[in-house]
Image (cartoon, coloured by chain):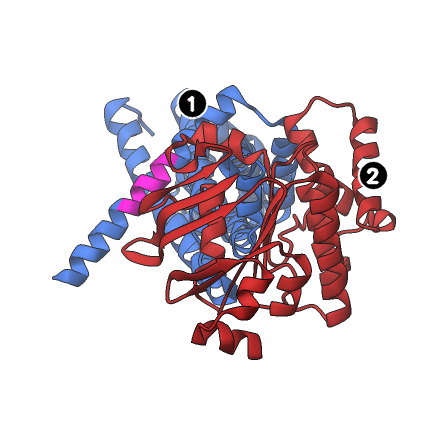
Chain colours: A blue, B red
Amino acid sequence: MEYLRKKMLDLLQSMGDFSLMVAKSFRYMATHFRTGDTLIQMDRIGVGSIPIVFLASIFAGLDMALQFEVVMAPYGARALLGKVVTTSIIRDMGPVLASLVMSARVTAGISSELGMMNSTQQIDALRVMGIDPVDRLVAPRIFSGIVMMPILSVSGDFLALLAGLGISMTVGHVPAPLFWSGVRDALTAENLTDAFLKPLFFGFILTSIGCHYGMKSASGAFGVGKSTTKAVVAAAIWILVANFLLSKLLINVWGLTG
Amino acid sequence: MIQFESVSLGYGDRVVVSDINIRVPDGKTMVILGDSGSGKSTLLKGVLGILQPVSGQILVDGENVGTLEEEELLRYRQRIGMVFQEGALFDSLTVGENVGFWLWEHTDWPDDKIEERVRTLLRFVSLEEVIDQRPDALSGGMKRRVAIARAMAPQDPRVMLYDEPTTGLDPFTSRSICDLVRQVQSEFRVMSLVVTHDLHDAFRVGDLFAFIHDAKVILTGDRGTIEQSTDPFVRTFLST
């Protein structure tokens, strides 16, 4: 019982710390925006992630088109491949896959970097120099995640569609104009809202969780390793939870259709 | 003046040091001595306002550190130079950027003026030639020197804090760091608190001394007071 009580208190403390860090970050973004630091983080978080996100997107597009072709061919529904693949990719598969790949790279990177800074007293040094570490370290990373994730995800979606087109043409023998006609049908305002909105939230989740665990990391290689593992697992879970909640919200409340 | 008035400090429920009473007069260097884990560094965290006293108060130039709000603390810390145990240099920045960091953050000086100040500080610690190098290319002693230069970057630091400035260094380098600490104190007339467990280094840099044992200050005074003490812990410390 005492163990459970302590765990609950730790959880509440952690949630409180996280909320405070996020609130301060948004305040700093609004009042004390650090252009130089933010551009560096946009480069690291966004530009640096291009190869893995694009590679994952291409293979996701190839695989989805292949699987749908196998399922739809017996029903003579290959003509719908473009629409089905596009809808799946831009509403769900693209943002989630890109974010999970990003969490492995970005969340782990942020958590271990800030964890090492904490371990070597660099974060204490910032405080001593009259600089709030949230201002200098956290706010630029969260802002970069929020901005870069949608750009990466939507670019990845486009590549996934090209890969899907390739499979549809070569395996399913679907003419390109027919595939693109399905793509155009699927590019509704509602689906595009999903495509841009979800990665925006996921970008926030994977950077803020990385920062939270990094700033709270215990000292030493073991402590930093443990907090990095926790950060990546937490980010992956929260991305999946947020994906479901956002899907539910967008479908039910806003009345979206496929 | 730095004053600890019946100060207790700790982490969560655990009290690390209790009922501490110490005074560091203007322009003097006090060395806090004690064995590992005795809470010496915790006192520095109290002066910095990173840890709030469980009881008592810490006054720096009459200002009660424990009552400062976060924004006030950030301003207060600008008057304090801190040299961390391993230097705590920002490893993503060059030596020059580390030393000039405070100036870039808190002044609107042009870059050439900041560079001039950075070079002056690096000359002071005899390391101007490493201005463009990264901290990981420096030896332990060089890192401490750069950390001292960085701590001096504000024009008028009132207080200098040193956390085990010579730990892990060879005797020759330790001596040169101690000389530098004395030089900073004599040239800039700052109040200094030095935490160490090395008695030789303590006598090289200190004007006043305080021994911490079992979470309490068991003796304060100048070198003569320390050397004449009959306290068993102090005698053991002196004889090692």
Q: Is residue A87 left or right of residue B89?
A: left
Residue A205 against residue A33 in the figure, above or below: below
Question: Dot 1 corresponds to which residue?
Answer: A188
Number of on-image labels: 2
For label 2, the SS is helix
Question: Dot 2 corresponds to which residue?
Answer: B120
Chain for disc number 1: A
Residue B196 against residue B77 in the figure, above or below: below
B233 part of magenta stretch: no
Q: Is residue A85 visible?
A: no
Q: Quick one: label 1, few (<14), some, or many (20+) residues within 10 Å? A: some
Q: Which residues are magenta?
A: A13-20
Q: Quick one: label 2, few (<14), some, or many (20+) residues within 10 Å? A: some
Residue in the foreground of this view, choosing between A18 and A90:
A18
Residue in the foreground of this view, choosing between A37 and B47:
B47
| Alpha carbons under labels 2 and 1: distance apart | 63 Å
A19 part of magenta stretch: yes
Residue in view at x 73 percent, y 71 percent: B171
Chain for disc number 2: B
For label 1, the SS is loop
Position of residue B74 measured from the top left corner of the image (x, y, whole percent): 51, 32
Say what amino acid the circle numbered 1 marks: Thr
Quadrant location of the C terminus of chain A in the rendered image: top left
Residue in view at x 58 percent, y 33 percent: B78
Position of residue B58 measured from the top left corner of the image (x, y, whole percent): 42, 41
Position of residue A69 measured from the top left corner of the image (x, y, whole percent): 44, 48
Residue in view at x 71 percent, y 59 percent: B178
Quadrant location of the N terminus of chain A in the rendered image: bottom left
Q: Which mark is residue A154?
A: none
Q: Is residue B89 visible?
A: yes
Q: Quadrant of residue A155 in the image?
A: top right
